[in-house]
Image (spheres, rainbow, N blue to C red):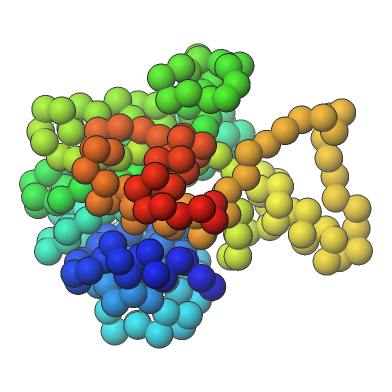
Amino acid sequence: MSYYPEILSGKLNAKYTWLVTGAAGFIGSHLTEALLSVGQNVKGLDDFSTGTQENINAALNNSGRAENFTLINASITDFDSCMKALKGVDYVLHHAALASVPESMQFPLKYHDVNITGFMNILQASRENNIKRVVYATSSAVYGDDETMPKLESKIGKSLSPYAMTKYINEVNAEFFTRVYNLECVGLRYFNVFGVRQNPNGAYAAVIPKWVSAVKSGKTPIIYGTGEATRDFCAVQNIVLANILAAFEVKAAGQVFNRLLHRLLFQFIVGYRSF
């Protein structure tokens, strides 16, 4: 799978050590694969509560650089494990989280523990280990009930789920750590990410893998509502590129970007036009 190697190689002109939290997940495994493929060292932190060993295996096999990868089987909710994982790390790509809106309505304490406390563990451990920058996944769910189109980073509504609230609180904490502790953080508000290794199973699986699975099985994809709803989709390869670029763009520190505006920003940075 192509992750724009000519751009990644140009940005990664030195060898760094990266921590990818949630490395066994859909996006995390793609980040791991892309970094390894251009000669970087990667540590993966995952407790396999949602990720799979198959994703890790695919990343290692496709990159051909398994010797540059270290897996730490632990949870971000354990601060000592975060401290251990961050030893010798230059950059953090934080993607470990629970991500089901309906499930968060049932288990808000669980989502607070993993998404908020877990992220705070990563921030504090990064601060104590003098990490260069933390790039973290936030979500379009932060926009809540705001109906403004197109979406603007500065205009959000009331949260509609505990999941959305955890992502918003993470943005507030990341801005604070950047401003007060000088730990550079950049948030990327993902909309609907799709691509290889996305799980099509489960009641709350993302729509594109569910549709692909239905078509492959000879079934008709289900579209709820009137059919007039719109969604913003983003290929996982572009998410990978956005993460790497966000790690190095000086002016991005302390900010949060949504899918549209970080796309335009990175087009400006690298002069690339294939998003």
Is residue 194 among the parts visible in the rendering? yes
Q: Is residue 46 left or right of residue 193?
A: left
Q: Position of residue 174 (x, y in %)?
A: 26, 33
Q: Is residue 16 left or right of residue 118?
A: left
Q: Position of residue 153 (x, y in %)?
A: 43, 25
Q: Is 135 located above or below residue 180 in the figure?
A: below
Is residue 123 among the parts visible in the rendering? no
Q: Position of residue 132 (x, y in %)?
A: 15, 50
Question: In the rendered view of the protein, which quadrant contains the N terminus?
Answer: bottom right
Q: Quadrant of residue 272?
A: bottom left
- 64 or 2, which lies in front? 2
Q: Is residue 2 left or right of residue 6?
A: right
Q: Residue at x 58, y 17 (%)?
A: 148
Q: Position of residue 202 (x, y in %)?
A: 68, 52
User: Which residue appears farthest toward the front when viewing the image?
Assistant: 271
- 26 or 33, which lies in front? 33
